[in-house]
Image (cartoon, rainbow, N blue to C red):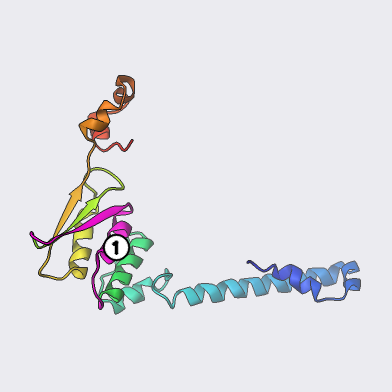
Amino acid sequence: MQRNIRQDMRDYMPRYYDDFPVVINLVDREADVIIALNEAAARTLAQVFAVSADRDLPRWERICGIKTDESKPLDVRRAIVMSRLQGAGTVTVEVVRRLADTLYGAATKVTEDFAGGRVVVTLVGKRGVAAEAEDVRKELRELIPAHLGIALDFTWFVWNEFDALTWNEADAFTWNELEVHMP
């Protein structure tokens, strides 16, 4: 629950001060300063943790041995840092899925191919070849043990789904748009 600092400060004062606009204005200005200090303290505290860092994210990347890439979104950079920090433990399907979800920005399905000695990551939240596939492969290679291969699979619009469209609906798409369409 968010506190209303301005109202709390007024409530601590005797009621007869309500008749003095100068005093109320002074209390409101003090409340503004306290609110700003609280926000600055919260922003500073957020930098201490990799999961919420933004301004100090390059420091976390340096600690983890990651080259800072300002072109990537903050949530992707945070996910990479978190995967490196958590990488000392056991790599599970869930850990791989969470990292892949964040890197792709869409849902993924991770399966273990024991016979093939690989991990298969299938992008199910969007269709077509993802532009960030090589970044995903690179980051997954850092996480997944070296003896396992990595396969990135992508989904496409299939004929069964095409049959569900009317000609007018299908005509609204170009072929390139249709093959990545998600009904």
Residue at 42% over, 71% down: 53
Q: Is residue 85 above or below residue 103?
A: below
Image quarter in which the C terminus is found: top left
Q: Is residue 15 above or below residue 136?
A: below
Q: In the figure, residue 101 lies in which quadrant?
A: bottom left
User: Which x, y percent locates residue 129?
Assistant: 21, 46
Q: Which residues are magenta?
A: 88-115
Residue at 61% over, 75% down: 37
- State the residue lying farthest toward the left: 116
Name the residue carrying label 1. 99
Does residue 22 appear to the left or right of 173 in the view shown?
Answer: right
Image quarter in which the N terminus is found: bottom right
Q: The disc labelled 1 sits on which kind of residue?
A: Leu
User: Which x, y percent locates residue 131?
Assistant: 24, 50
Residue at 18% over, 68% down: 144
User: Which x, y percent locates residue 81?
Assistant: 31, 71
Q: Is residue 94 magenta?
A: yes
- State the residue lying farthest toward the top: 167
Q: In the figure, residue 26 lies in which quadrant?
A: bottom right
As rendered, which of 85 and 34 lies closer to the eye?
Answer: 85
Sort mark 1 into few (<14), some (14-19) or many (20+) by Cα contacts within 10 Å.
Answer: many
Numbered label tally: 1
Residue at 23% over, 35% down: 179
Q: Helix, strand, or loop for circle 1? A: helix
User: Which x, y percent locates residue 149?
Assistant: 11, 62
Q: Is residue 82 magenta?
A: no
